[in-house]
Image (spheres, rainbow, N blue to C red):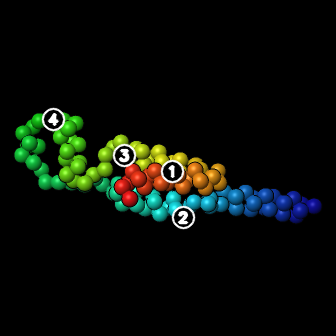
Amino acid sequence: MRFQRMAAACAVALVTCMSEGYAGPCSDEIDSVQVRVDAVAGSGRPSAPQTTEAQLHRQPTPGSVTAAEARAGDISVASMEAIKAGMARARAADAAGDKAASEQALAEVQRTLGQ
């Protein structure tokens, strides 16, 4: 009798673990887009040579920061937030098994990335 209870408990644990590891219908696409997002975002921020203005002990203005980011090839903060939100929507739709919504969110992310 004790063996049957143990076997039943193991079976329940096995089924639970298998359902948590299920990959949704767009998991591979999400992973490939995430690789592109990581490449654009990079592990660090792009850098550029120090300018003369930076040596004059003045605080940067929002406009000068935006211009410097554009010259360095950085993605804007607003675009990065849109990408993060889109990836979150894609993952949530994928987890729910909604392939159409996941693909739509991934398409929006790719448009934001400019691809």
The three-letter code of the residue at mark 4 reads Gln
Q: Please give the name of the residue rendered at 84% of the width and 63% of the height, measured from the top-left corner.
A: 7
Q: Earlier in the sequence, mark 4 or mark 2?
A: 2
Residue 44, x across and y down, in percent: 30, 54
Marked residue nearer the N-terminal end (1 or 4): 4
Q: Quarter of the image holding residue 41?
A: bottom left
Q: Secondary structure at mark 3?
A: helix
SS of the residue under disc 4 = loop
Q: Quadrant of residue 54?
A: top left
Query: What label sits on residue 28 in the rendered view?
Result: 2
Q: Which mark is residue 89?
A: none
How crowded is the residue under tag 3: few (<14 C-alpha within 10 Å), some, or many (20+)?
few
Residue at numbered disc 4: 59
Q: Mark 1 highlights which residue?
A: 105
Identify the mark nearer the N-term, 4 or 3: 4
Q: Quadrant of the N terminus?
A: bottom right
The structure residue drawn at horizontal position 19% and vertical position 47%, both measured from the top left corner, is: 68
- Left or right: where 64 falls relative to 87: left
Residue on which disc 3 sits: 79
